[in-house]
Amino acid sequence: MRQELIAKITVALSSQRADGTPRRAVGTGYPIRDGLVLTARHVVFPDNAMQGAQSLLSWCMQDKGEPYHTDAMGEVVYENEQYDLALIRCKTPLLTEAVQFAAQMPRSLEAWESLGYPNGGKDDEGVRSKTSADGTVKPDQGGHVRHLGVADHVPPEIWQGMSGAPVFKLHSNTLLGVWTHGNRGFPDRIMMTSLSYVLSHCAKFREQVGWVENSDSFTPVVQYLTTHSSVRQALVKLIQQQDPSVGDTALVVVKYLVALDLGALFKTLKQARKNTQDPLLRSGLAQLAKLLLPGVYDRPSLATVAEVCGLAKIPYATSVSAEMLMAGAIQRDMVLEFYPISSTNPQLAAVPGFYCLGLPPESGSVALQATLTDMEDDLFRRVGSQGIDKITSDIDQYLYDNLAQKSRASRDRPQKRIMVNNELKRLLERDQAGQYYWILQEGETGSLWPKVASYFAENYPSIRLLCLADDFDKEEREKDLFADLPDILKD
């Protein structure tokens, strides 16, 4: 969310002030791309609006002072009373980066943020300032309305003027919905129209915002290429060398890419970066690959990883495959790091980043010189036949040391587990945990490991366990495929 793009929307009312001038209803809006502002319907169509009144949109760089941009000629191109949404076509300020719509309904406890012009932001002279709000999403109520928990418990009238404000996933460009009303029965809640619900149920809204039907998992990729024209044109130039009939729209480019087999897709992305020395364009192509590759790698396995609780077996033999599947299952960017294979072989190889816990018995990356210390933590080898209690005790200690808030006070095992889970919850609320996971190797899933999986499911339910296949040939094929990843992703 960009604070300078928060718009104040005012509409003249039929009632008058003491000085005879019309009263004005105030609401908030946000441009979802150049020339198109999203708000609540009741903001632009208040019950007692003056006949023929137009909406005045204004943008202020600072809280006070003259607006740096106004437009009184906005045209309402979409309005829906059921969803309480409206779209206004107008001249928007600056260069508005297209927002990324949330492809799925917000999760319970997902952290959100918003900004607008509420009553509570007035100064002594009655001038409103931009005021922020944040909190977490309440459990799903069904339908298009979601209840949001607000950190500041104030009377609902304080929030009047926030109607139409954008509700973003915390610290991101992902738009969850539109603020519609307060809730007098629950002062700690406000109501939001979920855009993922509207996009899936309203064809007219999809048409107006340019949503891609029947390809929701690739919509962020289409939106990325729509916004980043230089990245799209670099790919179009390369693709048209192979097939001149391919068009140049973002949707056509994505459809072409996802139809390629994985080997050809990797080579195309590698060649596109090889064709330019522009660091911004190379970085843009790398970001595209991080968005695209997890969604095309193996869709059936994505469903397995997303839906299976406890220990999920996947038909792959490398930790990079595990990271791709985890990223695709929860729709986040891949997080990979690159290290030399050994002190004598400077060729870079990819390993999962921080979401993959380097836990015993196996992190999946022990072959790399930079991560050989993982072998020292390999509980399967270190504790031998000492049993499940020793393994789970060491797991508790490892997680406490690496994830929990450290303290000088000694803690017993239940206290350590509570502190680890509280920290994981805090990270999730701050959108800093895309879900941690731990990799097992199939050859090491002896009689103890189902017990370990059960222990995790009971005590650390937010950490996933993935079991890789013990298949040498498959591992070698995956390594060959991923050999191009440094050229595709690393700057």
Image (spheres, grey):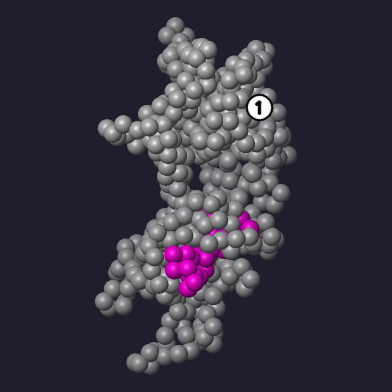
Q: Is residue 183 magenta?
A: yes
Q: Quadrant of residue 332?
A: top right
Whether residue 140 can be seen here = yes
Vertical placement of residue 82 versus 460, above or below: below
How far across and how far down the image is residue 100, in percent? 54, 51
How far across and how far down the image is residue 268, in percent? 62, 29
How far across and how far down the image is residue 277, in percent? 47, 29
Residue at x 69%, y 60% (from the top left corner): 201
Label 1 sits on a secondary structure element that is loop
Q: Quadrant of residue 300?
A: top right
Q: Residue 97 or 413: which is nearer the viewer?
A: 413
Q: Residue 100 or 156: which is nearer the viewer?
A: 156
Residue at x 68%, y 43% (from the top left corner): 252
In the picture, the quarter occupied by the N terminus is bottom left
In the picture, the quarter occupied by the C terminus is top left
- Give the labeled residue for mark 1: 314
| Residue interval drawn in magenta | 175-198
Q: Amino acid at mark 1?
A: Ile
Vertical placement of residue 394 versus 228, above or below: above
Number of numbered tags placed on the structure image: 1
Whether residue 286 can be seen here = no
Q: Residue 139 or 353: which is nearer the viewer?
A: 139
How far across and how far down the image is residue 324, in percent? 58, 31
Vertical placement of residue 233 versus 54, above or below: above
